[in-house]
Amino acid sequence: ELAADLGVGIVDTAPGYGDSESVLGAALAGAHSFQIVTKTPAFRTSKITRDHAELLELSLRESVARLRQDRIYGLLIHHADDLLAPGGAFLIEAMERCVSRGLVNKIGVSVYTAEQIDGILRRFTLESPSYRAACNEGICGRIEAWIIENAVERARVVRISAIVNTQIGPS
C-alpha cells in the first residue's frame, strides 16, 4: 500500500531475481493497482532454437503462477543479445503467442548499450511509436521511437527497458 501511495505504478521482477516473484505474489494477492513486468530467462547462447522459445513460454507461465496473477502487464527479453542471435525471432514469436494467449499485455526487450538498441531497431520493426522506458537513474517516462533511433546522446543511455504495444516483428 505504501508503494502505491507513493506513486509506484510498475513493479519490475524476473525469475532470475531469487524468490522475488513468489514474494510479490504473496504481497499482491488479490486486487492491486500495479503493472507487473517480468523477464525471460537469459539464454546466453550463440543460436536460439524453438526449444528456447518453448522454455520462454513455460517460464512465463511459471512466473504468472508465482506472481498469483491471471496475466501480467509486461514481458521483456532479459538478455538483448539473445534476441540478436541467429534464431532470435523465435523468441519474439513465442512472446507474441503469450500475448495472444492472454498471459501478458505488452512485450519488449531490456537493452543496455547503444549497440543493442541499434541492432534491435535494424532487425525488428516496432509496431508502436511509443515505449515505456526506464533508465538506470530510475527515471521512468514515455520516449518516442524516433528519439531512440536518432540517439540523442546515446552514450548517456545505460539501460532502456522498452515495453512495446504488444508487437515487435521482423523488419
Image (cartoon, rainbow, N blue to C red):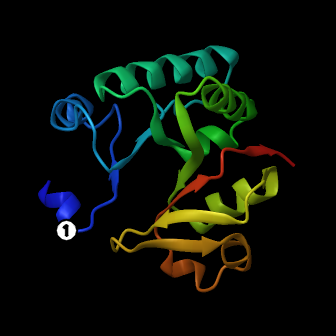
On screen, residue 119 versus residue 162, left or right, reads: right
Which of 113/170 is in front? 170
Which of 150/167 is in front? 167
Residue shown at 33% from the left, 59% from the top: 9
In the depicted structure, whether residue 19 falls above or below residue 125:
above
Q: Residues within 10 Å of mark 1 (few under 14, many from 20)?
A: few
- The quadrant holding residue 51 is top right
Residue 150 can be seen, yes or no: yes
Numbered-mark total: 1
In the depicted structure, whether residue 101 falls above or below residue 72:
above
> Where is residue 35 shown, x and y percent of the image?
39, 49
What amino acid is at disc 1?
Answer: Leu
Residue shown at 68% from the left, 32% from the top: 96
> Where is residue 131 shown, x and y percent of the image?
60, 63
In this view, the residue farthest toward the right is 171
Residue 46 can be seen, yes or no: no
Q: Please, what secondary structure does the residue beneath circle 1 have?
A: loop
On screen, residue 2 versus residue 132, left or right, reads: left
In this view, the residue farthest toward the bottom is 153
In the depicted structure, whether residue 132 falls above or below residue 44:
below
Residue shown at 22% from the left, 59% from the top: 4
- The quadrant holding residue 67 is top left
> Where is residue 161 shown, x and y percent of the image?
50, 57
**What residue is disc 1 on?**
6
Which of 156/74 is in front? 74
> Where is residue 24 shown, x and y percent of the image?
22, 37
- The quadrant holding residue 59 is top left
On screen, residue 5 versus residue 117, left or right, reads: left
In this view, the residue farthest toward the front is 31
Residue shown at 59% from the left, 78% from the top: 154
